[in-house]
Image: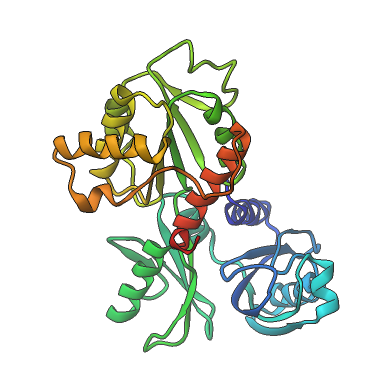
Amino acid sequence: MTDNEAVLAQARAWLADGKGVALATVIGTWGSSPRPPGSLLAVNAERDFVGSVSGGCIEGAVIIEAVGAIADGEPRLLDFGISDEQAWEVGLSCGGEMKVFVEKAPAAAILDGLLGERPVALATRMESATHALVRPRSQDGDFALGEAALAAARQALTENRSTTLDDPGGSLFVTVFNRPLRMIVVGAVHIAQALAPMAASAGFEVTVVDPRRTFATDARFPAVALRHDWPDDALAELRPDARTAVVTLTHDPKLDDPALIAALASDAYYVGALGSRKTHAKRLQRLRAADCSEEGLGRIHSPVGLALGGRKATEIAVSILAQAVAACHGRDKDF
């Protein structure tokens, strides 16, 4: 469960207990603000709270305004400047500015929708604190988005980016709730033993695929989802999408090549393969013979990982995870 999902779940539980609840959302940041747009904080009338909009430096003021919103039902748009001194206290090198929208919590039906299927976006009309749920093929709620705003909201879903939009009915903030990132690791090898828990701690849902049952064991991969089918069969069932990274680590063409062919035929946003440049050159020859396109082959990150210089399994795992995270944000070509 993501941080925002935990906030919504607690808000929903408070509502079920009959408590007044307010929701605070970061809707804009400038400079080194501690939390990105879309970050949530929920507060009840007793001033219990969950989540964060600033890492701690403005929470007190937001909670006071949230309690006020519970009492009078009126939304608030708050502007904050974070001083350099405050920034240091929350781990930043310098200050910034941020806008926070505070409102009485949306209706239980809206929260249930946000806690249900993925992907979904919450479109909030800030002047009236009314809400709509936007999905890839449908929308519902208090109002209907205009054609342009609806297209922009769906683009925000695709890009996993919470943002402000203009709409004929008033300014909207779109908070995106997407599927978790996934990482499919082919090869239950020593690097995978380091990579799987690191990726999980970074928010990836990790699956390790290896038909060799002596490699893919619960003892070697505690609390990791394991599959013992052949990699191409596993990927056919797992269906990598635009929020999936696929990493092959076996060094065995019988396992890696079918996995790479399946990954390149999918929407996986990141495909990485362990091996030296010489090994990768031979791999490319085999994949060309298997009718992989040059465009597809260009998607493979190999040698896999950022060039950090480390040789230990843990160091290689760090480099792979770093590159997968960078690719998720469109920054993998920057290194």
159 above or below 264? below
328 above or below 62? above
216 above or below 150? above
Which residue is found at the position 41% from the left and 52% from the top?
118
Residue farthest toward the top in the current orientation of the protein: 214
Q: How are the residues colored?
A: rainbow
* Residue 95 in view: yes
129 vs 271, nearest the viewer: 271
Residue 160, given in percent of the width and then of the height, sits at 44, 62
Which residue is found at the position 54% from the left and 78% from the top?
129
Number of dots carrying numbers: 0
Q: Is residue 214 left or right of residue 220?
A: left
122 vs 163, nearest the viewer: 163
Which residue is found at the position 75% from the left and 69% from the top?
92
Residue 119, given in percent of the width and then of the height, sits at 40, 55
Q: Quadrant of residue 68?
A: bottom right
30 above or below 134? below
Which residue is found at the position 31% from the left and 51% from the top?
299
Q: Is residue 8 left or right of residue 138?
A: right
Q: Is residue 205 left or right of residue 239?
A: right
